[in-house]
Image (cartoon, grey):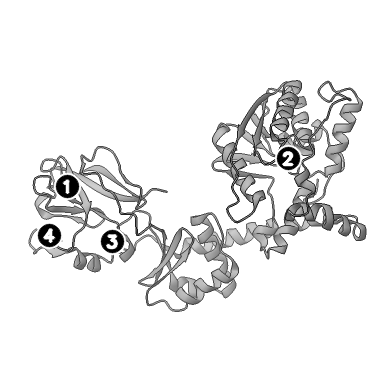
Amino acid sequence: MAPGALSTSFDCHALETVLFDDLGLSRTSRFVVAFSGGLDSTALLTAMAAIAGRTAVTVTAAHVNHGLHRDADAWQHHCQNMAERLGVEFRSGRVHVVNAGSGLEAGARHERYGWLTENVDSDSILLTAHHGHDQAETMLQRALRSGGSHALGAMRLTGTMSGLELVRPLLGFTRDALRDYLKDAQNKGHPALLNDDQIWIEDPANADPQFDRSFIRTDVMPLLSQRWPNVHDAFARVAAQAAEDADLLQDLARIDLDSMLRHDIPSAVQGDLGLCLAALQELSDARQRNVLRYWIRQATGHAPARVRLQSLLDDLCGEAEGTGSISLGDFSIHKYKAHLYFEKSVDPEQPTTTPPVWDFASPLVFENAGLRLVADAVKGQGVSQASVSHVTVRARESSDRLRIHANAPSRSLKNLFQEYGIPPWQRRHLPVLGRPVDDRLIAVPGLGVDASVQARPDETGWVIRVQRLSS
């Protein structure tokens, strides 16, 4: 079917076409259906059970009990019975939903997907029952929140969620098509859809206008449909076009970002790349916003609002020289020596704890600072294995000094950091290594090793790298 066009006819054969022909998924795949018991997921699970009956795929129904309605346990029991009648495996879990400021809908969605990612095997494919009318409602809701192309693209047919493959195979179908499919199957005597039984659950929250999504579904879309009968088709096409535009903007941002990130700048932490401000300033304002939005989304998982993005441009990107920082939730962006750097924020009230002794054998993790030390055995480099078998690990002190070159005097760490151009925010959290007998400083990971314990050309030494925990 053409992008954005919604089909008014649905059955298991149409679903097979989407999964195996359009998406090229294997007919031996393991599928997990997110099963609420509502109309949409019941239609999806019923069709998947039919597919499993004549192919080698396996199907599991996964139900999340949010505990938000007095009938939540009864709904879970209904879902288990339906899965058993359809002949598919059933899994369920209970979550505790908290309104963290973004509403119960968002809180329930966060907990639901959190449970699914933790309880669905990584080699399975998660199927959700979002359909074309859901897509139109999502697009309109995001438009009212001033979303750009990425937001207006709404839900994608395929994606990933915490490393789990996610597919929404019903996006090309109307809600009425799913209802007609279940009613037709019931009329034809489908054994799992008994005439005297409730086929699907009607959650009253779906019709409660206090929730934005429900208000759009029950009040806004019917009114628009009176004037424009094909409004769902139109919005689906807009979402498809917006998704295509967003992909093109992302491709451009990736090209721009690759040309701006510098791998050869001083850094004590492996993989901390700086974004060159001079290269950024050569772009048009729109491309500057586009590449920064992409860079931030890649690092944090979220794109900043346009106002916040413009503030970043005004405060840090106007001039290449100078320093400064801006906070973005749990992250900070620093400006230093004509480059921008990302850093995951560290609670200043929470000290960086360090184990007293390290033997280099396994990575040493500093959760509070978000860092780890990794030691590699390299001939002629690093801390001499013949001289040092283990070290003490501690925070640096103002009196610490290091003699990196054998024919030069020792120097303060402050001077060495400045000479080597180590960014100030990295200096704050770098642990230092001492000699076990007297705790005298012998190495600063990412900076250098004292000449007294440096490996000779014919010796094997420990080369110590500092990494972010997220890398």
Amino acid tagged 4: Arg
Of the numbered discs 1 and 3, the one sitting upstream in the chain is 1
- The residue that mark 2 highlights is 129
- The residue that mark 4 highlights is 403
Residue 236 in view in this figure = no
As drawn, the label of residue 107 is: none
What whole-number distance in Å separates the C-alpha atoms at marks 2 and 4?
64 Å
Q: Quadrant of the N terminus?
A: top right
- The residue that mark 1 highlights is 383
What whole-number distance in Å separates the C-alpha atoms at marks 2 and 1?
57 Å
What whole-number distance in Å separates the C-alpha atoms at marks 2 and 3?
49 Å
Amino acid tagged 1: Val
- The residue that mark 3 highlights is 427
Amino acid tagged 3: Arg
- Establish if 120 lies above or below 7: above
Q: Which residue appears farthest toward the front when viewing the image?
A: 70
Residue 364 in view in this figure = yes
Amino acid tagged 2: Ala
Of the numbered discs 2 and 4, the one sitting upstream in the chain is 2
Closer-to-camera residue (456/89): 89
Which residue does the image show at 65% across and 35% down from the upper left?
A: 65
What whole-number distance in Å separates the C-alpha atoms at marks 1 and 3?
20 Å
Marks 4 and 2: in contact by CB < 8 Å?
Answer: no
